[in-house]
Amino acid sequence: MTKAKLSYGGKDYDLEVMEGTLGPKVLDVRKFYTDTNMFTFDPGYTSTASCESKITFIDGEKGILLYRGYPIEQLAEKSDFMEVCYLLMFGELPTREEKDQFVHDITYHTMVHEQITFFFRGFRRDAHPMAIMVGVVGALAAFYRDSADITDPHQRKIASYRLVAKMPTLAAMAHKYSTGQPFIYPRNDLSYAANFLHMTFSVPCEDYVVSPTLEKAMDLIFMLHADHEQNASTSTVRLAGSSLANPFACIAAGIACLWGPAHGGANEACLRMLGEIGTKKRIPEFIARAKDANDPFRLMGFGHRVYKNFDPRAKVMSKAAREVLDELGVDGHLFEVARELERIALEDDYFIEKKLYPNVDFYSGIILKAMGFPTEMFTVLFALARTVGWISQWGEMIADPVKKIGRPRQLYTGPGMRDYVSIDKR
């Protein structure tokens, strides 16, 4: 057993060095406070391993993303979202029989309780769909109490299936509610991605045929966003789950966290930026602003907090973006600006030196806009895709024998102890 030594106040303390399959070694500080009467200080927990996990691995320096050990590029080329869902939830790729059964089970859980339609009517028509999703997903616990016992592995499995299956239905309903169109029921003869597109864009008065190209692109977007290690929303789901809250409440907490513009709202912010630029003629002006250290302007959709190299998901998404734009024959200033920005970022020495490559949000925003999704739905689609990652991380956390309720500590810098002064003497 390897140990690191810390010396403080004339005493030496031994800290065990833990080593995972991949990634940096970790110092075990669980007994640090007990032994030293000191806390560690790590705002944002960016240097702290909050858990042990076998699900997803990221190497930001090398631009690597692995789901259960499989590179995202291989999965994007050879797999599909339902197979990735099974992989994340159960740890291994399914056999043909296992996949068929899994797809069947998810498909036949896509309908939601009819009373939920009345729940939607309590929202304003112009409510942000993420606000609706936070409320409706949390409310699922009131409709599916038969799968809320987290001590029962079977009920945990059923709750997980229900969340993955019903999220597209709820997301499509949130969109339909904002447009004033009737809700569309799911169809069992369609794939997961095609079913979502059908529920989102079809109307009862005419047939809607899902384009195979758009279906493939939608499935790919879901796959690339399925999980991303211990990010803010995943950590929120785990923290909520550590209190033994029901899974529906935990996923609702994850959705609330994802709603933040620093997390799930990046592709929405990217589209707003493209709209602000307006035309290719104005690109040099905004490039100059991005390079100016004294200008607060940020070029959205470029670079990534974790990836210090090219985002591996972006490489896959860029090809899909071209296929979708070609299929739809999309033209216009927005997409011209996007393509020119992409060209500059891949050729400009400043962007290459700073490693400011287009990220997955840049391409996904373009694809979703071309498909016809309003920008306020972008983060909803992110939540839809990420649900399987959240529920897989939640399930792993619940089954962890060393789990504890989350309780971060603090460096207190407020007033010391003082006596109360009555109001007439202040």
Image: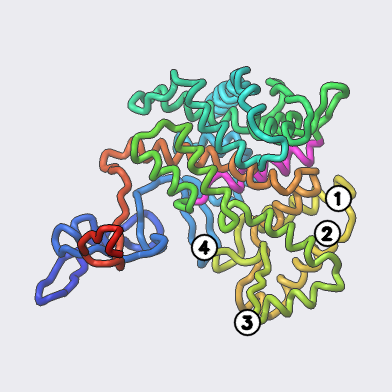
Say which residue appears at 56% left-offset and 22% top-offset.
105
Q: Choose the circle earlier in sequence order: 4 or 2.
A: 4
Query: Which residue bears the numbered disc 1?
Result: 326
Query: Which residue bears the numbered disc 3?
Result: 294
**Residue 92 lies in magenta, yes or no?**
no
Q: CA distance from mark 4 to mark 2?
A: 27 Å
Q: Choose the circle earlier in sequence order: 2 or 3.
A: 3
Q: Is 45 situated left or right of 383 in this image?
A: left
Q: Choose the circle earlier in sequence order: 2 or 1.
A: 1
Query: Which residue bears the numbered disc 4?
Result: 306
Question: In front of the other: label 2 or label 3?
Answer: 3
Question: In front of the other: label 3 or label 1?
Answer: 3
Q: Residues within 10 Å of mark 2 (few under 14, many from 20)?
A: many
Quarter of the rendering occupied by the N terminus: bottom left
On the image, the x and y values in percent for residue 258 come to 55, 48
Disc 3 and disc 1 in contact, CB within 8 angstroms: no
Which stretch did the figure color magenta? 211-228
Which mark is on residue 334? 2
Q: Is 274 situated left or right of 309 in this image?
A: right
Disc 1 and disc 4 in contact, CB within 8 angstroms: no
